[in-house]
């Protein structure tokens, strides 16, 4: 006999998504200081003024093809700050109860992504570069790559 559990999970996921509130992202956007002179522009961020954590890893995404998506996971402990160093892209953030999509298109803005936040990046413009400053070294066991598992863990964490 067919199990009804996958069907029930899918329906529950749809109901949950419809119930999502818009996430307030104001506090997540970090204004980065810039120094502009005749030689060009310089932008910086340092702990603890603009960065709420000390950086243990840096990586960047580039050459992301048209229509390609990145992310689609959450992190149990990792915090990150993301900057559109060049071009633009969209970042969907979802904490399990609220969600919002942020358009990043300025190297003067950092986006703080806290732990236990599902993220999906899309709509990369040609030549876009996404710089990420991370609080921890790479650790695959910190990833939650299944959305239902993320929702269950986020609800446990919020109780
Ligand atoms: C995130 C978004 C914004 C490593 O070996 N070391 C690293 O530091 C990273 C980030 C990745 N990898 C390996 C793991 C995979 O085999 O690179 C491969 C691609 O990683 P992933 O599919 O996780 O890439 P994205 O772009 O979907 O996600 C990345 C980060 O992994 C993630 O933490 O928040 O960028």
Image (spheres, rainbow, N blue to C red):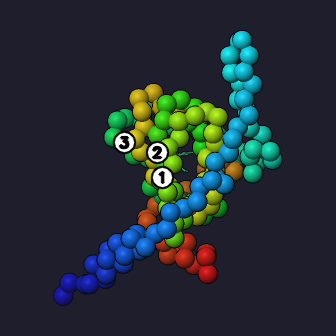
Label 3: few (<14), some or many (≥20) within 10 Å? few
Q: Position of residue 156 (x, y in %)?
A: 57, 78
Look at the numbered disc 1 and give the secondary structure of its residue: strand
Residue lying at the far bottom of the rendered structure: 1
Residue designated by label 2: 90
Drawn side of residue 111 relative to residue 68, left or right: right
Quick one: quadrant of the N terminus? Answer: bottom left
Residue lying at the far top of the rendered structure: 38
Please determine whether, in this image, residue 84 is positioned above or below residue 97: above
Q: Position of residue 132 (x, y in %)?
A: 60, 42
Asked if the beta carbon under badge 3 is closer than 8 A to the nearest atom of ligand 1, the reply is no
Q: Position of residue 45 (x, y in %)?
A: 74, 38
Q: Are marks 2 and 1 in contact (CB under 8 Å)?
A: yes
Task: Compare marks 3 and 1 and give the one earlier in the sequence.
Answer: 3
State the separation of the CA atoms marked 3 and 1.
16 Å
Instruction: Residue at 71%, 24% (x, y): give it.
Output: 42
Tell me if residue 64 can be seen. Answer: yes
Depth check, front residue: 70 or 50: 50
Instruction: Residue at 36%, 42% (x, y): give it.
Output: 68
Where residue 85 sits, quadrant-wise, is: top right
Q: Nearer the viewer, mark 3 or mark 2?
A: 2
Look at the numbered disc 2 and give the secondary structure of its residue: strand
Task: Compare marks 2 and 1 and give the one earlier in the sequence.
Answer: 2
State the separation of the CA atoms marked 2 and 1.
6 Å
Q: Nearer the viewer, mark 3 or mark 1?
A: 1
Tell me if residue 79 can be seen. Answer: no
Please determine whether, in this image, residue 100 is positioned above or below residue 19: above
Label 2: few (<14), some or many (≥20) within 10 Å? some
């Amino acid at each position: 006999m067919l199990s009804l559990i996958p069907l029930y999970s899918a329906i529950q996921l749809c109901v949950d998504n419809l119930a999502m509130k818009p996430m307030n992202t104001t506090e997540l956007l970090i204004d980065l200081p810039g120094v502009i002179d005749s030689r060009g522009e310089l932008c910086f961020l340092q702990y603890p003024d603009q960065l709420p954590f000390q950086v243990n890893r840096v990586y960047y995404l580039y050459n992301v093809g048209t229509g390609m998506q990145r992310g689609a996971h959450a992190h149990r402990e990792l915090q990150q700050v993301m900057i559109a160093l060049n071009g633009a892209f969209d970042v969907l953030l979802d904490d399990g109860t609220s969600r919002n999509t942020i358009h990043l298109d300025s190297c003067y803005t950092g986006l703080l992504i806290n732990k236990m936040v599902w993220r999906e990046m899309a709509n990369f413009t040609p030549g876009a570069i996404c710089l990420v400053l991370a609080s921890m070294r790479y650790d695959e066991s910190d990833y939650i790559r299944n959305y239902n598992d993320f929702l269950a863990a986020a609800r446990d964490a919020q109780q």
